[in-house]
Amino acid sequence: MRLLPILLKLNMVNGVLFTGGWAKTGLCHETVKAIFKKVLAKNDAADHFPSYAICLCFELLTMIITSTLQFMRNTNVEGTVFQRFQPDLLKKLSTDCLVMQNHHNTDLTNFFKVLTTSTDGDNKVYVSTDEAHSYPVTAFQWHPEKNAFEWGLSMIPLSDDAIQVTQLVANFFVSEARKSINLASACKVPDNLIYNYSPTYGGKGGKGYDEVCIFT
């Protein structure tokens, strides 16, 4: 019952962004699992309802959907989050530091197809971007959002190309959300906007996200 208000909010949006974090069990896992099931159900009901899963939630999805590992050698970027990337920017993703990596483990299931792989500090290859075979669901083991919005850590790239990566990933998600047939009631939207909450600066000294909303 405690998840009911959250699930009802899905009727007011056109997609879901599962963010990164630290908690893998308890309420976080329970909430992600319930919402993800609704995302799949909406798509099964012919509503194109996209979802991004970043960092922790990449891992949570692999826990929710269990199967064997599969890798693909050749990746066709058409129709994926990388479709708007110019060839030179795609090449730089493989050669330059344009995304923040902060992960050491990897998991993938038959639910997903592999878009990119990366190499960690121990020279081990892991899956860094994948996309569902039959749903508009993309999962990242890197942080497309940090380049344009966080400055507390030196490992976060802030170049023009890095900012373009953030923008193109975000633009693709919005373009997918526009395909959703979901339409929120105009009278309910104002009370549910994030603008009802005051953001708090939490990035001093590089200790956490630069800006957060604290819900009580």
Image: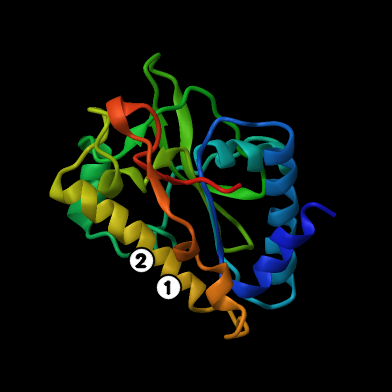
Residue at position x 36%, y 57% in the image: 169
Type of residue at label 1? Answer: Ser
Query: In the rendered view, does 204 fall on the left or right side of 62?
Result: left
| SS for callout 1 | helix
Q: Residue 38 at x, y = what percent?
A: 73, 62
Q: Which mark is residue 175?
A: 1
Disc 1 packing (10 Å; few <14; some 14–19; many ≥20): few
Residue 81: image x %, image y %?
41, 59
Q: Secondary structure at mark 2?
A: helix
Point 15% across, 44% down: residue: 159
Does residue 74 appear in the picture of this structure?
yes
Is 209 situated above or below 4? above
Mark pair 1, 2: CA separation: 6 Å
Query: In front here: 174 or 21?
Result: 21
Q: Is residue 211 above or below residue 51?
A: above
Q: Residue furthest top?
A: 122
